[in-house]
Image (cartoon, grey):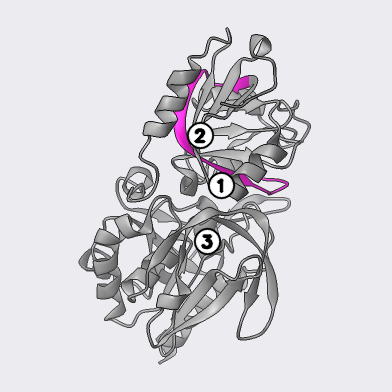
Amino acid sequence: MTITPAAQGKATACLALADGTIFYGQGFGATGETVAELVFNTAMTGYQEIMTDPSYAGQVVTFTFPHIGNTGANPEDDEAADPVAAGMVVKWDPTESSNWRAAERLTDWLVKRGRVGIGGVDTRRLTRAIRQQGAPHVTLAHDPDGNFDVAGLVARARAWSGLVGLDLAKEVTCAQSYRWEETRWAWPTGYGRREGAGLRVVAIDYGAKRNILRCLASAGCEVTVLPATATAEDILAHDPEGVFLSNGPGDPAATGVYAVPMIQGVLERQLPVFGICLGHQMLALALGAKTIKMNHGHHGANHPVKELATGKVEITSMNHGFAVDSQTLPEGVVETHVSLFDGSNCGIRIADQPVFSVQHHPEASPGPQDSYYLFERFADAMRDRRVA
């Protein structure tokens, strides 16, 4: 069993890996403990958006950037109603907020929302371990008195079943359908509102980020959001001009049990379809491809992706632990994007239909806006179908 500083006597938080490695540090946020998969994120900004991204359900996030907490927290930057990530690991204790948009300190924000944090951890060492050994199962505990049953924490980490075979989309999806009309944030007015008739889009919520829905609205879409378990009949009853498949957490093969038949039913109508992240994986499964669990996944806002048709390289935001196996793509399905980090699949399309998806996040929350054109491409496909 490996023990790393801080000294156990001064520690108020403990991160226990399933292999017996223990990291001590200073706790912040809520007290208690949580069991999850440990990943790292290399983004230099957007910690609040990351913590509230439903795709992080079942995961504790290690932030490689040391300055966490310096911009505080505010209601406008939430990607879901509450944090979904199980906890956070940082190098330095969260700093005091210094930003004109801050409504409260990050530590207070975490306390109110029941999320555990640990600071004072050697995040470089932790990140190297994740890269070399794969994303481990961990128990993260925060006790102001510093009382930890280390053997019990390790045992709980080892006993956790993990994300493989786990359908988390049902846990983070909306309970009922709703309309979305808010548009992207812009200076100096903030978020806007779409007005008038638009392109009718049904968005399937596997854990949809709010900024994705804002991007659809900004592209001229009249968005109706349906739960993950919606059937093809449920979707077609809204007479959509396009169908959007959102991001989300968990094992795509597990979610695909009910999502794949729905997508196949929609494809029979030859409607434009656009998928992001888990939605990309759902589309691939519906077309006959397979998905695989990655060693440590892709999590960050600096991932280079190449669009094969143009040769253009986009810097993208990513968050996924599973990937589409490009070797299993059937005839008629074209690979459109690849990661320049490891060559993994980052996009597909059907050769003769306006149906496409990407593994990365073009909504840029947080992250660059290089891939925003994909929302316009989806809108253009629906406009072309109107004309036809």
Q: Position of residue 205 (x, y in %)?
A: 38, 55
Any part of residue 144 in sight:
yes
Q: Which residue is mark 2?
A: 19
Name the residue carrying label 3: 194
N-term-proximal mark, 1 vs 2: 2
Q: Which residue range is magenta in the image?
A: 27-47
Q: Is residue 37 above or below residue 346?
A: above
If the image is split into quadrants, where does the N terminus sit? top right
Residue 216 located within the stretch drawn in magenta: no
Tell me the residue that label 1 is attached to: 133
Asked if the residue at tag 2 contacts the one at tag 3, i.e. Cβ–Cβ closer than 8 Å, the answer is: no
Foreground tag (3 vs 1): 1
Callout 2 crowding tier (Cα within 10 Å): few <14, some 14–19, many ≥20: some
User: Hey, what amino acid is under mark 2?
Assistant: Asp
Label 1 CA crowd tier, 10 Å (few <14, some 14–19, many 20+): few
- Amino acid marked by disc 3: Arg
Identity, as a three-letter code, of the amino acid under mark 1: Gln
The main secondary structure of the magenta stretch is strand
Task: Estimate the x, y position of residue 137 in percent, counting from the top left.
Answer: 47, 37
* Residue at point 50%, 52% (across, down): 209
Q: Are marks 1 and 2 in contact (CB under 8 Å)?
A: yes
Q: Nearer the viewer, mark 3 or mark 2?
A: 2
Residue with the most extreme right position: 98
* Residue 356, visible in the rendered structure: no
| Dot 1: element | helix
Using the numbered discs, state the Cα–Cα distance from disc 3 to disc 1 in whole angstroms. 47 Å
